[in-house]
Image: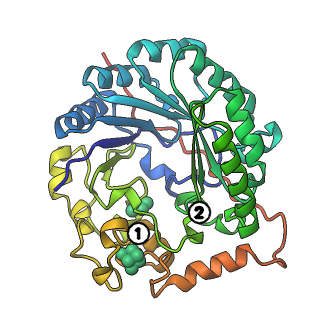
Amino acid sequence: MDKPYALLAELTYSCPLHCAYCSNPLQLDDYRDELSTEEWQRVFAEAADLGVLQLHLSGGEPLQRHDIVDLVQYANKLGLYTNLITSGLGLSARRAEQLREAGLDHVQLSIQADDPALSDQIAGTKSFERKQAVASLVKQLGWPLTLNVVLHRQNIDRIGGILDMAEAMKADRIELANTQYYGWAEPNRAELLPSREQLERAEVLVREARERLDGRMEIIYVIPDYYSQYPKPCMDGWASRHFTVVPNGEALPCPVAHEVARSLELPPATVREHSLAWIWEEAPLFQQFRGEAWMPDPCRSCERREIDFGGCRCQALALTGDASRTDPVCHLSPDHGLVEAAVAAANDPTRPQGGSLIPRPQMGRPRRQRTAA
Ligand code: SF4
Ligand code: FES
């Protein structure tokens, strides 16, 4: 069994934004009983003992935790590389300096578009100007800056402007990842999945920008897997290298595996009851799809099974109702017609224009957050 090298700590699902592509669970209020400062610190220490090197602090909006500086400082002392994944809202100059002093290594800033009105509309709140200010603060304080832009039908045509904006911000890296259909993105899929024409135009612009910005800005571009022949090697394989702990302490092999656990009626593995080492090695949810023994046909005899691990378990569940089926994105899957139908609908010239998105709602007030002594 491999050891995990990255821990995604989803500190809170509280968030000032309302993005319709959010992968957070639909039942946000089930996660209000958040781990305390001391509980998170114990999780970080156990992660470091297990061999984890990278700690991604995310949410929701991790800056909604008033103990974020203490958490970063603690993780830094453990020798973990700390990455803050943030909307930027809540990052004042003072807090940024405190985080710098606490040893935060890297900032990933989300932004929704290059056009202020569109960015604010997608975020469901006025945030564009603040994000610009945060980007320059990040650079001033000497952090490497990665911009995260989730792409979808409503902003992908702005990709040229988005790349220009990233260049003007002196971003070191930009991740242009098309939406994955989990959490709130799933019911919004019809309004988010781009057309083939949109993707073709975007790819030309990305290629040009890669040539122009070679050596200055790294551009990661991820197409929607619905348009691929084969699925993505999700999480590098189930419970293979990644660990996620969500705000109430449940540990998962990926950020959206709550649904897989529920569908299989597996008991939640929580850090309040078990050590990370026990969860990694023993928890039924982590064992369920590890390796190859669980694979059905056609994966079982397919030569790509060590490359993509049969695709994504959460996507198989979302599309077929059964997490153990071959990911329907794969053209060899008996369920591939489900993906073909979604792609056909996205490319239907008669489809109604301007449908509305369901915004991710605000979570209720979290119930447990204590400051470090
Ligand atoms: Fe991957 Fe399974 Fe498709 Fe083969 S059949 S390419 S292993 S998803
Ligand atoms: Fe959960 Fe792919 S997102 S396995």
CB of mark 1 near ligand 1 (< 8 Å) = yes
Q: Are marks 2 and 1 in contact (CB under 8 Å)?
A: no
Which part of the image, by quadrant, shows the C terminus? top left
Lower sequence index among marks 2 and 1: 2
Q: Decide if residue 49 is in sight here.
A: yes
Name the residue at 80% across, 39% down. Answer: 115
Q: List x then y, in percent, for residue 296.
A: 31, 83
Q: Is residue 63 left or right of residue 271?
A: right
Which part of the image, by quadrant, shows the N terminus? bottom left
Residue 324 in the image: above or below residue 150: below
What kind of element bears circle 1? loop
| Quadrant in the rendering for residue 212 | top right
Q: List x then y, in percent, for residue 107.
A: 51, 29
Q: Amino acid at mark 2?
A: Pro
**Tag of residue 180:** none
Q: How is the image coloured?
A: rainbow
Q: Amino acid at mark 1?
A: Gly
Dot 2 corresponds to which residue?
224
Q: Is residue 1 left or right of residue 79?
A: left
Q: Is residue 132 left or right of residue 93?
A: right
What kind of element bears circle 2? loop
| Quadrant in the rendering for residue 6 | top left
Q: List x then y, in percent, for residue 156.
A: 73, 54
Q: Is residue 293 left or right of residue 198?
A: left
Residue 99 in the image: above or below residue 322: above
Circle 1 packing at 10 Å, graded few (<14), some (14-19), many (20+), is many
Dot 1 corresponds to which residue?
311
Circle 2 packing at 10 Å, graded few (<14), some (14-19), many (20+), is some
